[in-house]
Image: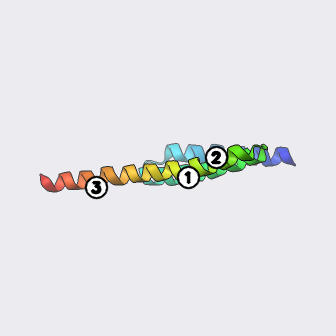
Amino acid sequence: MADAVIVVVLLLVAATATTAVAVRDPVRQALVLSVLGVVLAVLFTVLQAPDVGLSQLAVGSALTPLLLLLAVHKVRRRARRKGRQE
């Protein structure tokens, strides 16, 4: 039973990671990266590493995508402002 759960979660990790690479829009990439963080947290929990799972949940599904979204927002805002000045 546990092996089946691990295989399913590993397949979810592979599918989510592939989707994160295939998506072209940076905002969507950040959102898929957040989902990947949640799936990895589940994988770590299934593999009996709940401390690593909690860390992954905090960093991989919340903090990193948030920083990426803020960076994309700032770059787009600068590009709009620069376009108005010209």
At 51% across and 54% down in the image, what residue appears?
31
State yes or no: discs 1 and 3 in contact (Cβ < 8 Å).
Answer: no
Q: Residue furthest left?
A: 86
Picture coordinates of residue 23 (x, y %)? 48, 48
Q: Nearer the viewer, mark 3 or mark 2?
A: 2
Q: Residue furthest right?
A: 1
Label 3 to label 2: alpha-carbon separation = 32 Å
- Can you see residue 84? yes
Of 8 and 76, which appears nearest the observer? 76
Q: Nearer the viewer, mark 1 or mark 2?
A: 2
Picture coordinates of residue 33 (x, y %)? 54, 49
Picture coordinates of residue 5 (x, y %)? 80, 49
The secondary element bearing badge 1 is classed as helix
- How would you rate the neighbour count of disc 2 (Cα within 10 Å): few for under 14, some for 14-19, many for 20 or more? some
At 65% across and 45% down in the image, what residue appears?
13
The secondary element bearing badge 2 is classed as helix
Mark 3 is on which residue type? Arg
Mark 1 is on which residue type? Ser
Name above or below for residue 10 compared with residue 83: above
Mark 2 is on which residue type? Ser
Task: Say whether residue 19 is left or right of residue 10.
Answer: left
Mark 2, residue position = 55
Mark 1, residue position = 34
Q: Which mark is residue 65?
A: none
Of 56 and 83, which appears nearest the observer? 56
Label 1 to label 3: alpha-carbon separation = 23 Å
Mark 1 and mark 2 lie on one chain; the one further toward the N terminus is: 1
Mark 3, residue position = 77
Mark 3 and mark 2 lie on one chain; the one further toward the N terminus is: 2
Give the colouring mode of the picture: rainbow
